[in-house]
């Protein structure tokens, strides 16, 4: 059972970084330029979380659905990921932040998988915070894979169906130990969840900003935090 919380700072923020393509189009650039500018906002978000004492930050960097985008755009996003790891690894070490992935890492190009696995391994003992990249991530895919794992345990006689609880489902998700997000931010004015953390966002506070992701910088982040701090979270209870 969740407790009512009076915490003013979210422990875990999840972000749908939307609007890179539209930002680029508005400036007359190729879509890829929007993703590049978006990567700068990623750095800002990480810094803001660190300064505010947010322990977990999950970024929806690439969805299972994103594979259908033009080959060149997918390749550019993978390249940005390589560059991001190369340029930011030292900051993870400096700040004792652990890198993790939620999603089907096995779908990514092998060299990217290798590099991510290396950085995850090198940062796995850090406990100042966690940066979680949702990569080839889909909420329904995650739940489907969890159901398959559970079904195998039932079939093997290790798990009686009647003992399946919400906790069983949670324990079979990609990152069972990560607490649910307290705050979900989506930029670019779209009011959708887009298959993001469907199970984990059940009780999250939702915050939508019209600003496109490449323009979402410190003042916007602060506004989201301030807005969150005024929310009353009841988890189904009364005042
Ligand atoms: C959505 O905007 C954004 C993405 C699909 C990719 C997000 C990636 C980044 C911010 C870049 C790098 C990230 C890391 C972690 C290095 P969109 O392309 O759907 O925008 P649109 O709706 O305006 O077309």
Image: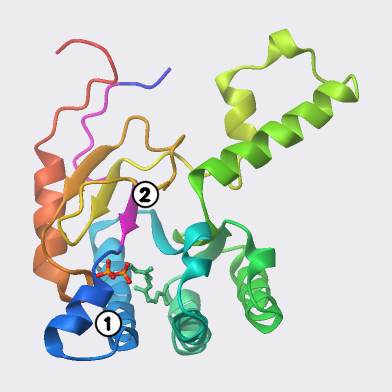
Position in image of residue 193 (x %, y %)? 33, 45
Which labelled disc corresponds to residue 194?
Answer: 2
Q: How many labels does the image show?
A: 2
Position in image of residue 236 (x %, y %)? 28, 15
Position in image of residue 106 (x %, y %)? 69, 65
Q: Judge left or right: residue 141 versus residue 33.
A: right
Range of the magenta residues?
A: 4-16
Q: Judge left or right: residue 237 versus residue 173.
A: left
Q: Dot 1: what SS?
A: helix
- For image coordinates 22% across by 69% down, the residue present is 213
- For image coordinates 37% across by 31% down, the residue present is 202
**213 is within the stretch colored magenta:** no
Q: Bin the neighbour count of mark 1 within 10 Å (Cα to Cα): few under 14, some 14-19, many 20 and up.
A: many
Q: In which quarter of the image is residue 18?
A: bottom left
The main secondary structure of the magenta stretch is loop
Asked if residue 90 shows in the view, the reply is yes
Position in image of residue 239 (x %, y %)? 14, 13
Asked if residue 177 shows in the view, the reply is no
- For image coordinates 44% across by 44% down, the residue present is 197
Q: Distance between the residues labelled 2 and 1?
A: 20 Å
Does the residue tagged 2 have its C-beta within 8 Å of any atom of ligand 1? Answer: no
Of residues 73 and 231, the one nearer the viewer is 73
Q: Judge left or right: residue 140 versus residue 108.
A: left
**14 is within the stretch colored magenta:** yes
Q: Judge left or right: residue 111 versus residue 9.
A: right
Where is mark 1, residue-wise? 34
Does the residue tagged 1 have its C-beta within 8 Å of any atom of ligand 1? Answer: yes
Sequence-first tag of 2 and 1: 1
Contact (CB < 8 A) between labels 2 and 1? no
- For image coordinates 14% across by 53% down, the residue present is 224
Q: Could you tell me which quadrant the N terminus lies in?
A: top left
Q: Bin the neighbour count of mark 2 within 10 Å (Cα to Cα): few under 14, some 14-19, many 20 and up.
A: few
């Amino acid at each position: 059972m969740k407790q009512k919380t009076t915490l003013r700072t979210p422990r875990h923020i999840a972000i749908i970084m939307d609007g890179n393509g539209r930002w680029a189009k508005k400036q007359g650039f190729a879509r890829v330029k929007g993703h590049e500018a978006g990567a700068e906002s990623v750095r800002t978000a990480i810094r803001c979380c660190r300064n505010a004492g947010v322990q977990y930050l999950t970024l929806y960097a690439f969805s299972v659905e994103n594979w259908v985008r033009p080959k060149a755009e997918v390749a550019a996003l993978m390249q940005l990921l390589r560059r991001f790891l190369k340029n930011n690894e030292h900051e993870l070490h400096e700040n004792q932040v652990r890198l993790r992935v939620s999603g089907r890492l096995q779908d990514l190009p092998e060299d990217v998988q290798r590099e991510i696995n290396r950085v995850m391994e090198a940062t796995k003992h850090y406990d100042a915070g966690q940066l979680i990249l949702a990569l080839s991530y889909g909420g329904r895919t995650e739940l489907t894979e969890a159901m398959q794992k559970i079904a195998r345990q039932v079939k093997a006689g290790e798990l009686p169906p009647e003992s399946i609880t919400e906790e069983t489902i949670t324990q079979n998700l990609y990152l069972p130990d990560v607490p649910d997000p307290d705050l979900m931010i989506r930029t670019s004015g779209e009011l959708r969840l887009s298959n993001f953390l469907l199970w984990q966002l059940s009780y999250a506070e939702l915050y939508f900003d019209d600003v496109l992701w490449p323009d979402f910088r410190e003042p916007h982040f602060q506004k989201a935090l301030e807005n969150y701090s005024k929310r009353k979270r009841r988890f189904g209870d009364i005042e």
